[in-house]
Amino acid sequence: MVDRPGARVRAAVVGTGLIGGSVLLRMHAAGIDVTGWDPDEATRREARRIGVPAPDRLVEAVTDRDVVFLCGPLPTLPATLVEVAAVTGERCVLTDVGSTKEEVAAFAAAQGLTHRFVPGHPMAGTDRAGLTAAGSDLLTGAAWVLCPAAGAATAAFRWLAELLVDLFEARVVPMSAAEHDSAAALASHVPHLLAGALAGAVQRAPLRDAILALAAGSFSDGTRVAGTPADRTANMLLGNRDRVLRELTEVTAFLDDLTAALRAGDAPALTARYDEARTSRAALRDRRFDAYDRQFPLGGDHTAEVSWLHELGVAGGHLTGLRVGVETVSYAARRPAAD
């Protein structure tokens, strides 16, 4: 997509909060020619204070860039995408970091931007917000979803995936936008609901202060994301509402099983449900992977390549490297090992 062999990558980050700021700081630390822009004047001043160029006008920040990361709030992404696309060249790769993908991917397609917009979502964060909470290592080694599309769009995906692996040591997870939103509903979005429910119940409890005095790791771990800025959580949940509600039904069904066993004093049933849950938790902690390599021709319609990429992500795999040669693209990947 960007064809400047041996040249220095020129990047921009639009929206320099926690995630965008971490992208910005990592690129700056790595010596990338990067500019930042944020609608908040104080945030721009903070970026300049730490040595990162942050023009006052968006157009100045994104002009003549090879890649632009769109990192503002979810509701602002469509308008920002159109604005940035209008003032950047056709060979500039655009991507985002939003927690839902299908809506923005469909919008980009309707705007004729699929050939250079690659929907993305790094799976990392904290319960804090803003550039002052960002860190150059926050995204290092993160699972970073990218949504490749066939045709000319595949070139933008390859270029961006290679950049993320090289710069962030990212585990690039290729998925369709719909597959991402379905998986993220249970992996990320429903946990925000549960954390909010637990923390909110404690806030309303008559013994609130006594409960907080006794709260240890289980409460702290289980409510961490309840500390996320409320508007950011609301935007995320509303942006994936149907899938979140569907997965929440599955969670409440399991909770109903636990409740019924507890109410009946049924120790075997309660133990069985927790054994089932423990298996999932153990799989998260002890996952083993096998390495795979695949090559595809640079030319053609790329349907087989994108199909393989989507299948890799759905199978729980990720890319650990890729290199674009003269006639082929070579992928290094890892998939969960068979039990």
Image (cartoon, helix red, strand yellow):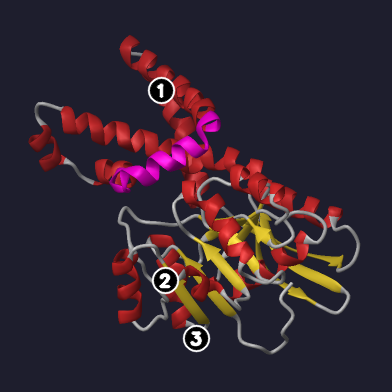
Q: Nearer the viewer, residue 276 or 176?
A: 176
- In the picture of the structure, the residue carrying the numbered disc 2 is 137
Measure the C-alpha gap from mark 2 to mark 3: 14 Å
* Badge 2 or badge 3: first in the primary sequence: 3
State the separation of the CA atoms marked 1 and 3: 49 Å
Q: Quadrant of residue 320?
A: bottom right
Image mark for residue 255? 1
Amino acid type, residue under disc 1 in the picture: Leu
Question: What's the residue at 34%, 63% (across, down)?
Answer: 40
Mark 2 residue type: Asp
Q: Which residue is mark 3?
A: 31
For the residues labelled 2 and 3, say whether their Cβ atoms are less than 8 Å apart: no
- Name above or below for residue 24 compared with residue 333: below
Q: Which residues are magenta?
A: 226-243
User: In the image, which is nearer the foreground, mark 2 or mark 3?
Assistant: 3
Q: Is residue 339 at least partly visible in the picture?
A: no
Q: Tag 2's secondary structure?
A: loop
Query: Can you say which quadrant of the picture contains the N terminus?
Result: bottom right
Which badge, 1 or 3, is on the more N-terminal residue? Answer: 3
Q: Position of residue 75 (x, y in %)?
A: 48, 46
Give the quadrant of residue 270: top left
